[in-house]
């Protein structure tokens, strides 16, 4: 199998599978229980919080576990707006956010919040200035993604946060860090005047699905959006997914330990793929060059073949790619690619390829060779 859809989800690592086996049979207590089995489960949470906090250089008590980034985004955005609406009602975001951000903000817009949507400029990027020029004394939240899940575009989130705070120190800055987490170093120390909230997810980094987290800088005012117990200091109530959280901690450690080699490997794969695509011609590469885009998500259009036709053709050859983000793949076109200002023909034929550390050059060659076969079959000369 040639799996090239790692931005949608990743295969759990060997170590993660071992952790699952250990915990599922031996460490099944409820972390809120007062007996020894509960304490053992609580230790899983403590260790995972420490692993993540060390890599962010923040405090462990600033890490909150959730069911994934969709929930983290919702808590961050709704929670910040509910807790701070007395200070203003203006939100700034971009047109290229993941639906879990865009739909949450659209919901708030319907309920009286004013929203400014920033689009990529004619170079296909979003600059610090594009976001910050709209910040004023009524702006309570800026929510921007770190890496776009469809094209790999990188946003300068740390600089954006700094510039936002210079204009209005009370504005809360949220970053959807899902596609950058463990690949781009983000320092979230409570002493920095920068990012206040950062969402991340387990299944994009070889942990299990259904687990994620939210960094909440200490003293940031957030209201809960679900009520019940006291878990995660009342911000995300409900019994914690200890199994998932253990895998998230483990996968975070593994990812950071091996980060340098992985990034070099992605660079090699990206260059090889782009070289080969340029060689065969008739392809438009929609991702920008590094450093504006990351090397592990490459979006391109095979002109003349609709994405879904190519996707199914590749699948018959056991090559798995995406025609856009996995969660919007059932809707007809990628509205995100349209937001990048791409022509309809390019949007209709766009393919997203995303790597993991086990992706090989041979797999890239197999992909390109199969695209050549597809073109011979579907494009009339
Ligand atoms: N944000 C981005 C940028 C994503 O790519 C995704 C998943 O594809 C999410 C949020 C949602 O993450 P989860 O699947 O953990 O809910």
Image (tube, rainbow, N blue to C red):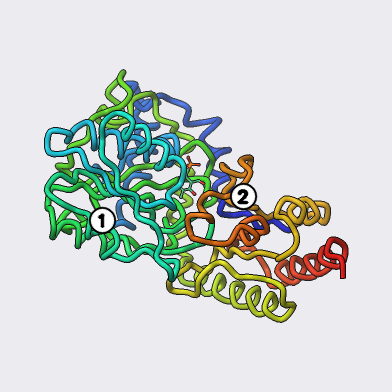
**Which quarter shows the C terminus?**
bottom right
**Residue 9 visible in the snapshot:** no
Total labels: the figure holds: 2
Q: Secondary structure at mark 2?
A: loop
Residue 142 or residue 306, whichever sits in front: 306
Q: Is residue 2 above or below residue 17?
A: below
In the picture, measured across the screen, residue 319 lies left or right of residue 244, that is right
**Residue 39 x, y percent position in the rendering:** 34, 29
**Residue 340 x, y percent position in the rendering:** 48, 60
**Residue 111 x, y percent position in the rendering:** 29, 28
* Disc with the residue nearer the chain's start (1 vs 2): 2
Which residue is depicted at the point 54% across and 32% down?
24
**Residue 98 x, y percent position in the rendering:** 46, 46
Judging by the rendered image, the residue that carries numbered circle 1 is 188
Which residue is depicted at the point 51% across and 35% down?
23
Checking the image for residue 11, the label placed there is: 2
In the picture, measured across the screen, residue 340 lies left or right of residue 126, that is right
Residue 259 or residue 171, whichever sits in front: 171
Q: Is residue 266 above or below residue 30?
A: below
Residue 65 or residue 25, whichever sits in front: 65
Which residue is depicted at the point 30% across and 51% down?
53
């Amino acid at each position: 199998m040639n799996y090239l859809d790692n931005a949608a989800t990743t295969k759990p690592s060997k170590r993660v599978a071992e952790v699952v086996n250990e915990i599922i049979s031996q460490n099944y207590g409820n972390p809120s229980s007062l007996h020894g089995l509960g304490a053992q489960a609580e230790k899983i949470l403590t260790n995972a919080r420490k692993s993540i906090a060390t890599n962010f250089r923040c405090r462990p008590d600033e890490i909150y576990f959730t069911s994934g980034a969709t929930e983290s985004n919702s808590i961050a955005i709704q929670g910040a707006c509910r807790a701070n609406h007395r200070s203003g009602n203006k939100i700034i975001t971009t047109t290229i956010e993941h639906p879990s951000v865009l739909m949450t903000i659209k919901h708030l817009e319907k309920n009286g919040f004013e929203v400014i949507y920033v689009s990529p400029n004619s170079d296909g990027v979003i600059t610090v200035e594009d976001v910050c020029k709209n910040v004023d004394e009524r702006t309570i939240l800026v929510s921007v993604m770190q890496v776009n899940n469809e094209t790999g575009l990188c946003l300068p989130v740390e600089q954006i946060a700094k510039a936002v705070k210079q204009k209005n120190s009370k504005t809360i800055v949220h970053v959807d860090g899902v596609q950058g987490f463990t690949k781009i170093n983000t320092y979230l120390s409570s002493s920095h005047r920068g990012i206040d909230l950062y969402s991340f997810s387990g299944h994009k980094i070889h942990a299990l699905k259904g687990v994620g987290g939210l960094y909440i800088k200490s003293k940031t005012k957030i209201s809960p959006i679900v009520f019940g117990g006291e878990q995660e200091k009342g911000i995300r109530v409900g019994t914690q997914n200890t199994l998932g959280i253990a895998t998230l901690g483990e996968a975070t450690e593994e990812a950071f330990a091996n980060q340098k080699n992985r990034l070099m490997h992605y660079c090699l794969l990206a260059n090889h793929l782009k070289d080969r695509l340029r060689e065969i011609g008739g392809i438009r590469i929609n991702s920008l060059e590094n450093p504006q885009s990351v090397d592990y998500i490459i979006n391109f259009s095979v002109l003349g073949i609709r994405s879904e036709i190519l996707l199914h053709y590749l699948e018959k050859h056991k090559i798995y790619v995406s025609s856009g983000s996995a969660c919007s793949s059932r809707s007809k076109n990628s509205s995100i690619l349209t937001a990048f200002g791409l022509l309809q023909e390019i949007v209709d034929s766009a393919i997203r390829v995303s790597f993991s550390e086990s992706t090989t050059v041979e797999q890239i060659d197999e992909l390109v060779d199969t695209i050549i076969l597809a073109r011979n079959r579907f494009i009339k000369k």
